Image (cartoon, rainbow, N blue to C red):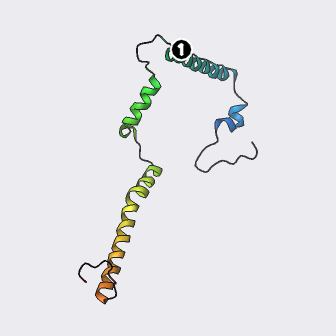
């Protein structure tokens, strides 16, 4: 744990924080064990339903239903942050300006060569 350096934009994970990892009260430890037991029981119940050879109905997994809903409807829960705004500008606005600059300079250079008479036109149809 002594070699671990914290990232500037992220906190220390719970597993690496000595105060959270070693100094856990008995009540909190019992609560975590109860949650783990509940999760294990739910997982066992789901696996029994999933592997039942005589089932004829669909199995409703609430977590999967929530995940599918969140993937299908991202905008009601979207929150603009610095990161999302920067990514939106980087992948939405910057490429448009870059392409505009590239095409404009290419066209201007070609027009200058045409005006100067130095442009060698390949594949001329009328020669």
**Residue that carries the numbered disc 1 in the rendered image:** 48
Hey, which quadrant is residue 102 in on the image?
A: bottom left
Hey, which quadrant is residue 112 in on the image?
A: bottom left
Q: At 65% across and 23% down in the image, what residue appears?
A: 28
The quarter of the image holding the N terminus is top right
Hey, which quadrant is residue 89 in on the image?
A: bottom left
Q: At 43% across and 58% down in the image, what residue appears?
A: 90
Total labels: the figure holds 1
Closer to us: 101 or 8: 101
Disc 1 crowd, CA 10 A, few/some/many (<14, 14-19, 20+): few
Q: Is residue 31 above or below residue 127?
A: above
Percent of width and height locating residue 42? 54, 17
In the visual, does 47 lie left or right of 124?
Answer: right
Closer to us: 95 or 1: 95
**Furthest residue toward top:** 54
Q: At 35% across and 80% down in the image, what residue appears?
A: 109
Percent of width and height locating residue 93? 38, 59
Q: At 38% across and 39% down in the image, what residue appears?
A: 74
Label 1 secondary element: helix
Q: Is residue 5 above or below residue 48?
A: below
The quarter of the image holding the C terminus is bottom left
Closer to us: 75 or 120: 120
């Amino acid at each position: 744990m002594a070699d671990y350096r914290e990232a500037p934009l992220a906190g220390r994970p719970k597993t690496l924080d000595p105060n959270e990892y070693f100094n856990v009260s008995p009540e909190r430890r019992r609560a975590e064990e109860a949650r783990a037991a509940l999760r294990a029981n739910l997982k066992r119940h789901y696996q029994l339903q999933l592997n039942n050879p005589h089932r004829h109905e669909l199995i409703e997994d609430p977590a999967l239903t929530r995940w599918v809903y969140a993937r299908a409807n991202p905008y009601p829960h979207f929150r603009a942050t610095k990161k999302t705004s920067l990514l939106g500008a980087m992948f939405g606005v910057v490429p448009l300006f870059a392409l505009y600059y590239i095409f404009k300079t290419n066209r201007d250079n070609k027009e200058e060569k045409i005006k100067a008479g130095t442009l060698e036109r390949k594949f001329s149809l009328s020669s």
